[in-house]
């Protein structure tokens, strides 16, 4: 194990049933949880919630080949390409047909730092997973993971063992429904993609 890895105790592994609730309950509860893909990952420090009823969600215009996973049962991974460059990962929430998901925006690297540094081509751990595209690059998540169950290999999500101080604010990088305060993160974390206004 590389000396740079940090191995805090993991909470219980979250099952798909955890995600069968309101996206607005789940999103803040994921802050402090641990996300691992093939054993590589760390603590989720920033997320955003999206729901079919608002125009920033990919599901807003209905079912398409890309968004089909969002309309399916909860507890699965929805992966999409952003700006034709970066993969982004989302956890599908709520009942089948509701088309809600949580975008994973930033992770504090904890396990498999050597692999993440190699994949990202940089050493600074603060920059490894400080954005949704960076998270996928560091964890080697691509479209091949679209539709994967969140409680089956190679993905494991472990419940947080303590509740961090959580900040909230408007979502980033969108023009539609930009006023909705559906972004959550660990207050003051240096691993965020962008600080919250009151940090």
Image (spheres, helix red, strand yellow):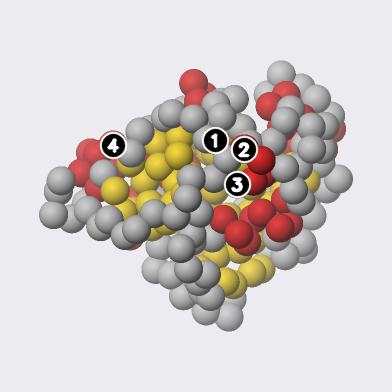
In front: label 3 or label 1? 1
Against 145, residue 94 (above or below) is below
Residue shown at 72% from the left, 65% from the top: 181
Q: Which residue position is annotated with label 2?
A: 16
Q: In this view, does 148 lie to the left or right of 25?
A: left
Q: Distance between the residues labelled 3 and 4?
A: 21 Å
Circle 1: element type: loop
Q: In this view, does 64 lie to the left or right of 124?
A: right
Against 70, residue 42 (above or below) is below
Q: Which residue position is annotated with label 4?
A: 119
In front: label 4 or label 1? 1
Pick whichever, 138 or 20, lies toward us: 20
Pick whichever, 15 or 60, lies toward us: 15
Pick whichever, 161 or 28, lies toward us: 161
Residue shown at 48% from the left, 68% from the top: 162
Q: Which residue position is annotated with label 3?
A: 103
Callout 1–callout 2 Cβ contact below 8 Å: yes
- Residue 147 picture quarter: top right
In front: label 1 or label 2? 2
């Amino acid at each position: 194990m590389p000396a740079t890895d940090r191995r805090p105790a993991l909470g219980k592994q979250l099952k798909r049933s955890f995600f069968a609730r309101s996206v607005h309950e789940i999103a803040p509860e994921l802050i402090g949880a641990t996300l691992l893909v093939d054993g590589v990952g760390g603590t989720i420090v920033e997320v955003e919630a999206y729901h079919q009823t608002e125009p920033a969600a990919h599901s807003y215009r209905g079912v398409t080949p890309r968004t089909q996973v969002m309309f399916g049962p909860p507890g699965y991974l929805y992966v999409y390409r952003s700006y034709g460059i970066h993969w982004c990962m989302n956890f599908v929430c709520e009942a089948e047909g509701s088309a809600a998901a949580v975008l994973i925006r930033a992770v504090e690297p904890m396990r498999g730092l050597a692999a993440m540094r190699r994949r990202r081509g940089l050493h600074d751990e603060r920059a490894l997973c400080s954005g949704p595209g960076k998270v996928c690059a560091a964890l080697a998540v691509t479209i091949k993971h679209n539709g994967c169950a969140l409680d089956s290999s190679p993905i494991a999500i472990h419940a947080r063992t303590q509740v961090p101080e959580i900040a909230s604010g408007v979502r980033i990088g969108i023009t539609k429904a930009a006023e909705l305060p559906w972004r959550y993160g660990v207050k003051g974390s240096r691993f965020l993609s962008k600080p919250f206004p009151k940090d």
